[in-house]
Amino acid sequence: MDARSLKIKAAAEALTYIEDGMRLGIGTGSTAEEFVRLLAEKVASGLNVVGVPTSERTAALCRELGVRLTTLDETPSLDLTIDGADEIDPQLSLIKGGGGALLREKIVAAASTKMVVIADESKLVGTLGAFPLPIEVNRFGLAATRLAIERAAAKLHLSGPITLRMTGTDAFVTDGGHLILDASFGRIPDTRALSDALHAIPGVVEHGIFLELARVAILAGADGIRTLTTKTER
């Protein structure tokens, strides 16, 4: 089974969590886009939901397919967010941001009663960190911020290249107008400590470690669907 088929399977399973009248957070990325396409079919058949997109890319797809949208200013409390992830550990901590929308994704997830993550089973890892950690940073003071990140990481015995994300010959710019540094630290034994250390750096806007946000992970594999839940969800 190819990667897209697995993404569609996970997205289809996520639809079972959707109820009529829900206020949804709608994620960004290839797996989330498969969810949007399936959700749009349900909407066309009469499902009444409204969504807050986590990126301009997701918003454009929703509008194209007829999924009604709102904003967090209009609807500041959401019932459920469905989103993908770049890595998922057994405690449902995540690395996100490969698509560049980590700030809005984290804001939307935090505004939701529940977050359900959809992915293929290759995203499940024992310890986060093989996927480079996206760190969204302010344009001002980029070199100083990068140095501060290197120093904070070194205190936690983490090292590795920290590279500015590019699109062709230009720096990648997020929907919020920021830049992204991708930190290839490798295995991150203490994600909480790294999260706190990065948040203490003034030039860091947000980072892609998502802790205590996801409550359900739907993982699709060749043998079917595997669902992981946090202890509070069981």
Image (cartoon, rainbow, N blue to C red):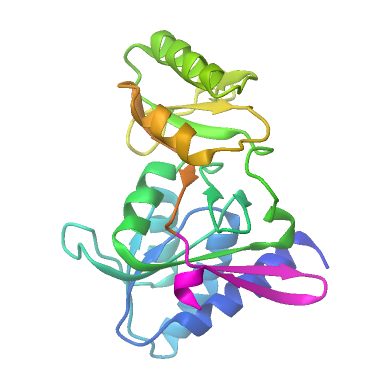
Name the residue: 76% across, 77% down. 224
Q: Quadrant of residue 47?
A: bottom left
Could you tell whether 181 is left or right of 222 in the image?
left
Stretch of the chain drawn in magenta: 214-234
Residue 129 position, x and y percent, is 64, 38
Q: Is residue 118 visible?
A: yes
Name the residue: 41% across, 82% down. 43
Q: Is residue 219 magenta?
A: yes
Q: Quadrant of residue 190?
A: top right
Q: Is residue 55 visible?
A: no
Could you tell whether 225 is left or right of 52 in the image?
right
11, above or below 61, in the image: below
Name the residue: 57% across, 58% down. 91
Name the residue: 70% across, 76% down. 225
Residue at the extreme bottom of the image, as rendered: 46
Q: Nearer the viewer, residue 20 or 205?
A: 205
143, above or below 112, in the image: above
Q: Quadrant of residue 92?
A: bottom right
Number of numbered discs overlaid on the protein picture = 0
